[in-house]
Amino acid sequence: MADVDLLVAGAGGGLAGALRAAEGGADVVVAEANPHYRRGNNTAMSTAMVPGPGSRYQRAAGVEDSPERFLADVAAKTHGEADAAVAGTLARVGAPLVEWLADRVGLPIELADVDYPGHSVRRVHTVPGHHGSALLRGLADAAEADPRIDLLVPARLVGLERDGEGWRVRLRRPDGDEEELTARAVLLATSGYGADPDLVATHLPEIAGAAYHGSEYATGDALRLGGALGAASTTLDAYQGHAGLSAAARTLVTWTTVMHGAVVVDTEGRRFGDETVGYSEYAAMLAARPGARGWVVLDARIDAATRGFRDYLDVVEAGAVRWADTVEELAGRLGVDAAVLGAELADAAAVARGESAVDRVGRRRVAAPLEPPYAAVEIVPALFHTQGGLAVDEHARVLDASGRPLGGLYASGGAAVGMSGHGAAGYLAGNGLLPALGRAYRAAEHLTSILTQKEIPA
């Protein structure tokens, strides 16, 4: 007889799995290595964005969407490289997930009023303030209040072996003390390997020199534990980068500025690519520029439109926004040639006014010309989280090299393969949290269907 039905390793997106499993009648233990997980894990550090194609929030806003449309966007962004089974499952679970987060967890879910690169409609759902700490707080509070869930914090999963039809797990406390328990199933929700410099250098050399903006506990635990059991791994070169990390505040300027019409220049005042292709792939582009840094240039209109984001407010409050009344003054504050900067802003403005179909760097959509007073924030490229990991099936079950499930072992989030294909260019806004929350949710449904002998959800 196992001690618990489910052991969840990781109290980020894994909490969605814990709550969903408890809702289905399972007894759950959540082991989390980070004592400060409420503010220091990748879920807490996210912008709380979850795609939910076909949700009631979209219908209320008059947005026509479906899992099929979302999958078409994923296929286009990844050039067909996304795992079809993984992407299909997540596309279908997105809408039920965001509605469950509102109805079961009590989160104030809303449809983000922003057009993000690669999404053909507005389908990204979030919470007020657009900050993952609020989302995680709701999940953690709900888990702590659930009598079927026990949280062990801090405790790190360091050992995993088969025990009859279940698993024997070994947990280690920071002082070195260890304890064992048995579980009928295990969900690896320990994030990816972004905090391991050697793994990053091996699999992500193009971004290895950039700042890492994620949990220090994302050290590839799932890869090591799963690999020791014969689990397969895939797309380890996939990641989410971000080109909009404030150099001074070390928090996000947010790419919403760009979608409202901001432009990005390098340390010489020159633009170097179409900013609307996506903030993930733009990180490597920025990393390749002189000094591996640049500037987001915006104006008062964009500043006002972005203040609903907690991250951007942190940038403002840190004094990282430089203001100027003229292009010449702004150029002086940035240390760039005024003529170069002025030409770049004029080129983008011509597209915004409809005078040009495309600007010098290939951008075709600029919301409005930038107007004085101007502002700029110095930015550096960052690695946020990895998107490759253990191979899983549509139920989030970990697979061995021959494609067979390792019975009762599940993986979610950065511990498992994502839906972004290879590299950074396939990443769509929200496609980090959707695998983290959605696959944990799906794993819990699969497990409880087995425990209760109910039909497995499609």
Image: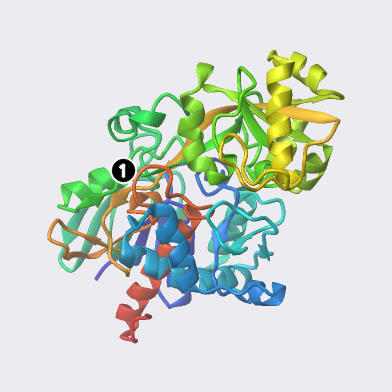
Q: Quadrant of residue 123?
A: bottom right
Image position of 413 (left or right of 278): left
Which residue extends farthest bottom?
Answer: 454
Q: Quadrant of residue 110?
A: bottom right
Which residue extends farthest left?
Answer: 402
Q: Position of residue 222 (x, y in %)?
A: 30, 47
Residue at 48% of width from left, 63% of height from top?
A: 16
Relative depth, front residue between 393 and 72: 72
Q: Position of residue 250 (x, y in %)?
A: 61, 29
Residue indicated by mark 1: 221
- Camera sees residue 141: yes
Image position of 239 (left or right of 85): right
Q: Position of residue 457 (x, y in %)?
A: 38, 80
Relative depth, front residue between 172 and 395: 395
Residue at 24% of width from left, 43% of height from top?
A: 224
Which residue extends farthest front?
Answer: 355
Residue at 35% of width from left, 32% of height from top?
A: 196
Amino acid at circle 1: Asp
- Camera sees residue 214: no
- Mark 1, secondary structure of its residue: helix
Counting other residues with Cα less than 10 Å from the Cα at mark 1, is it few (<14), some (14-19), or many (20 or more)? many
Relative depth, front residue between 244 and 265: 265
Q: Is residue 2 above or below residue 435?
A: below
Residue at 63% of width from left, 32% of height from top?
A: 264
Q: Is residue 16 above or below residue 375?
A: below
